[in-house]
Image (cartoon, grey):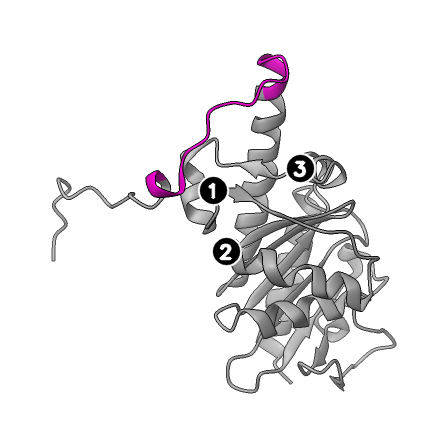
């Protein structure tokens, strides 16, 4: 069932591991099938390099397991993924990573401001990457903590935990997780260079003004 989506989830999870966004068994990834509404999600406790599409679990939005081929269980953070899909009908993919710079700000419960213009691609309605209040991993409290911030941004930090990135496309959700880590590192280095003083950030209005240059004449 949903073999192609399962293979895509495996590819995304292994790319996240190889690029350092999350290592070994940390982090989790899912894709929602538009036709059935089912979600394919990574299992708990399987090393990424050993992961195959047979290990990917299929569940519904009420956390009922529809299909598991091997002796695994869905990630313990499944409720968080399902809550995102219930909150944002436009979202079809969720990437949860534990990248180092971004997680450092999550530990501090510190929002990351839009200090580079590439933040225009992250749907930051308030001009910052928001932080979801702490909820123990795997709990209903964690899943409920993401509801409001994920309405305000396609990327959020989880207090004391990591990063959540969403999109209609799995590759794009992972790309957004990469952007968050790169932005977090730039922000950290800027604070160090600037003696701890906050750098200038772009306003929501300015971020919303980007357009493809009209001067570029495309052949039709």
Q: Quadrant of residue 108?
A: top right
Q: Which residues, given as a range, are shown in magenta?
A: 191-206
Residue 165 image point, x, y percent: 59, 54
Query: What residue is drawn where x is 84% and y is 57%?
Result: 136
Q: In the rendering, which numbered label is found on residue 110? A: 3
First in residue order: circle 3 vs circle 1? 3
In the image, 145: left or right of 210? right
Q: How far apart are the alpha carbons under marks 2 and 1?
A: 20 Å
In the image, 149: left or right of 22? left
Q: Residues within 10 Å of mark 2 (few under 14, many from 20)?
A: some
Q: Quadrant of residue 166?
A: bottom right
Residue 195 lies within the magenta run: yes
Q: Nearer the viewer, residue 219 or 95?
A: 95
Q: In the rendering, which numbered label is found on residue 127? A: 1
Q: Dot 2 corresponds to which residue?
A: 172
From the image, which quarter does the C terminus lie in?
Answer: bottom left
Q: Residues within 10 Å of mark 1 (few under 14, many from 20)?
A: many
For residue 196, above or below residue 7: above
Considering the numbered disc 3 on the image, is that residue within a helix, a strand or a loop? Answer: loop
Q: How far apart are the alpha carbons under marks 3 and 2?
A: 24 Å
For residue 189, above or below residue 148: above
The label nearer to you, 3 versus 2, is 3
Q: Quadrant of residue 106?
A: top right
Q: Main secondary structure of the magenta part?
A: loop
Residue 45 image point, x, y percent: 86, 62
Q: Residues within 10 Å of mark 3 (few under 14, many from 20)?
A: some
Residue 214 image point, x, y percent: 15, 44
Query: What residue is drawn where x is 78% and y is 64%?
Result: 141
Considering the numbered disc 1 on the image, is that residue within a helix, a strand or a loop? Answer: loop
From the image, which quarter does the N terminus lie in?
Answer: bottom right
Query: What residue is drawn where x is 58% and y is 37%?
Result: 112
């Amino acid at each position: 069932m949903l073999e192609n989506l399962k293979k895509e989830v495996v590819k995304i999870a292994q790319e996240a591991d190889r690029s350092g966004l999350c290592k070994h068994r940390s982090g989790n990834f899912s894709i929602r099938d538009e036709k059935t509404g089912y979600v394919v999600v990574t299992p708990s406790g399987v090393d990424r390099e050993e992961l195959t599409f047979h290990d990917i679990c299929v569940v519904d939005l009420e956390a009922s397991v529809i299909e598991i081929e091997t002796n695994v269980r869905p990630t313990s953070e499944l409720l968080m993924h399902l809550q995102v899909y219930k909150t944002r009908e436009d979202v079809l993919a969720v990437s949860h990573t534990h990248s180092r710079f971004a997680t450092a700000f999550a530990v501090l419960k510190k929002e990351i401001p839009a200090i580079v213009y590439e933040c225009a691609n992250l749907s930051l309605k308030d001009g910052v990457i928001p932080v979801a209040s702490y909820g123990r991993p795997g709990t209903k409290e964690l899943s409920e903590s993401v509801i409001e911030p994920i309405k305000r941004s396609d990327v959020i930090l989880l207090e004391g935990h990591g990063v959540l990135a969403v999109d209609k496309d799995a590759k794009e959700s992972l790309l957004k997780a990469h952007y968050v880590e790169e932005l977090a590192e730039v922000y950290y280095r800027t604070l160090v260079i600037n003696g701890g003083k906050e750098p200038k950030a772009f306003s929501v209005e300015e971020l919303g003004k980007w357009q493809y240059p009209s001067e570029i004449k495309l052949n039709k």
